[in-house]
């Protein structure tokens, strides 16, 4: 799994994930990065999932943990460009009723 982030506005950061979001210490980077960005007053965190190829239950758990961290800081979590496979996983788990999904990162950035 690869992770990077880009500040796109005063309080908006895009976190780009690539590869397999699976069990292991690599996926811990997700919640660590979210916590770090919240400390820097980023209140809108957009996950760009366009390059994610697989996810397991631990990976899903990282998004749930991130959601709780962000909501606790009165922020917003947005998911952008999720491939169909990931959209189906989130739908089956009914997480598409909790997380906000956008077709593109640009759409997620425009939301107020």
Image: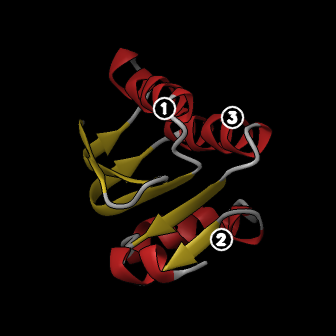
Decide if residue 13 is on the left or right side of residue 34: left
C-alpha distance separating marks 3 and 1: 14 Å
Q: Residue 91 bears which disc, if any?
A: 2
Q: Mark 2 or mark 3, which has the lower sequence index?
A: 3
Q: Mark 1 or mark 2, which has the lower sequence index?
A: 1
Q: Quarter holding the C terminus?
A: bottom right
Decide if residue 60 is on the left or right side of residue 17: right
Q: Which residue appears at 76% of the width and 63% of the height?
A: 98
Percent coordinates x, y for residue 35 in the rendering:
54, 27
Decide if residue 38 is on the left or right side of residue 16: right
Q: Which of 23 and 38 is in front in this view?
A: 38
Q: Which residue appears at 36% of the width and 73% of the height?
A: 83
- Identify the residue under disc 3: 69
Percent coordinates x, y for residue 55 in the rendering:
42, 47
Q: Which residue appears at 51% of the width and 44% of the height?
A: 42
Asked which secondary structure carries label 2, the reply is helix
Scheme of colours in the image:
secondary structure
Give the mark toward the camera: 1 or 2.
1
Q: Nearer the viewer, residue 90 or 76?
A: 76
* Mark 3 neighbour class, 10 Å CA radius: few under 14, some 14 to 19, many 20 or more: some
């Amino acid at each position: 799994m690869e992770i990077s982030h880009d500040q796109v506005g005063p309080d908006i950061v895009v976190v780009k994930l690539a590869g397999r979001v699976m069990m292991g210490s690599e996926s811990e980077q997700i919640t660590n990065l979210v916590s770090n960005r919240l400390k820097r007053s980023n209140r809108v965190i957009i996950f760009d999932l366009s390059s994610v190829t697989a996810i397991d239950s631990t990976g899903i758990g990282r998004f749930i943990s991130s959601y709780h961290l962000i909501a606790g800081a009165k922020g917003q979590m947005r998911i952008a460009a999720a491939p169909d496979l990931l959209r189906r996983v989130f739908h089956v788990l009914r997480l598409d009723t909790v997380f906000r999904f956008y077709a593109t990162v640009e759409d997620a950035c425009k939301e107020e």
